[in-house]
Amino acid sequence: MLEIRGLSACIGDKEILKGIDLTVPQGEIHAIMGPNGSGKSTLGYVLSGREDYTVTGGTVTFNGANLLEMEPEARAIAGVFLAFQAPIELPGVNNANFLRTALNAVRRARGEAELDAVQFLKLARAETKRLHMRDDMLKRNVNVGFSGGEKKRNEVLQMALLRPKLAILDETDSGLDIDALKIVADGVNALRSAEFSALVITHHQRLLDHLVPHRVHVLSQGRIIRSGGPELAKELEQSGYASLIAEAA
């Protein structure tokens, strides 16, 4: 599914990623943890094709294709989805129209028939109900006036509709209360299949209680310094990062 080898990247003159090696097999969920400023969000941005970042070395292969040579929209059509840590507001852009346009663009690229307004609303309302979102959120502008939890649920709604092959969740759990956290996790778990993988960037083990990743990777100063099973997240919750960082120094 996703094969990263020696990935290095910078923003301006500042080097952030310094040789990332990571493999996410098809059908698996992997978690990325680490202290602030370690490069977690940068990794997500580079994989999704954000133009602010410059790749200075390494390779990224996604389903056999060179991901780094693809434009952001081509990555999305190929099945890469990024859920933002802080979803932006789009004044004047209707949420339902935005979601339907995105979904039909992906369906066209996959050779599938586009959904008309009635078909789309039936599908979208079923997903909003499952995510405990009010129907009127589809009528509002994208994320405008949404609470923090509503914005995160809207990201998961996009993911549920687009059905990506690789979802990158950039601290989607930040700012969520216990109930909202479970709803977001349930939305991700509903997509789990042999063809779906996810890279979950998080500070907190509590999200991983619901998602139960196959592997956990600790990122520090632009490098993965340790990998392990779900128990590694529990260890970090108890003891923090200091000892691991000291060992890797």
Image: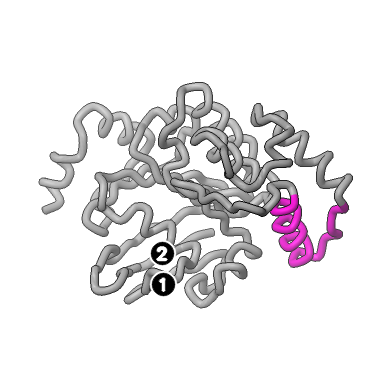
Q: Is residue 40 above or below residue 5?
A: above
Residue that mark 1 sits on: 59
Residue that mark 2 sits on: 4
Q: Along the horizontal axis of the image, is 75 left or right of 43?
A: right
Q: Along the horizontal axis of the image, is 214 left or right of 152?
A: left
Q: Contact, CB < 8 Å: mark 1 with mark 2? A: yes
- Between marks 1 and 2, how big is the CA–CA gap? 6 Å
Q: Residue furthest front?
A: 92
Q: Secondary structure at mark 1?
A: strand
Looking at the picture, tell me which residue is in the foreground, 178 or 240: 178
Q: Position of residue 64 (x, y in %)?
A: 56, 69
Q: Is the residue marked by circle 1 packed among few (<14), some (14-19), or many (20+) residues within 10 Å?
A: some
Which residue is pictured at 46% across the width and 63% down the height? 47
Query: In this picture, which residue range is highlighted in magenta?
Result: 97-116
Q: What residue type is disc 2 on? A: Ile
Q: Is 106 in the magenta?
A: yes
Which residue is pictured at 51% across the width and 77% down the height? 69
Number of marks: 2
Q: What residue type is disc 1 on? A: Thr
Q: Is 173 in the magenta?
A: no
Q: Secondary structure at mark 2?
A: strand
Q: Position of residue 14 (x, y in %)?
A: 24, 69
Q: Along the horizontal axis of the image, is 234 left or right of 247?
A: right
Q: Mark 1 vs mark 2: which is more N-terminal?
A: 2
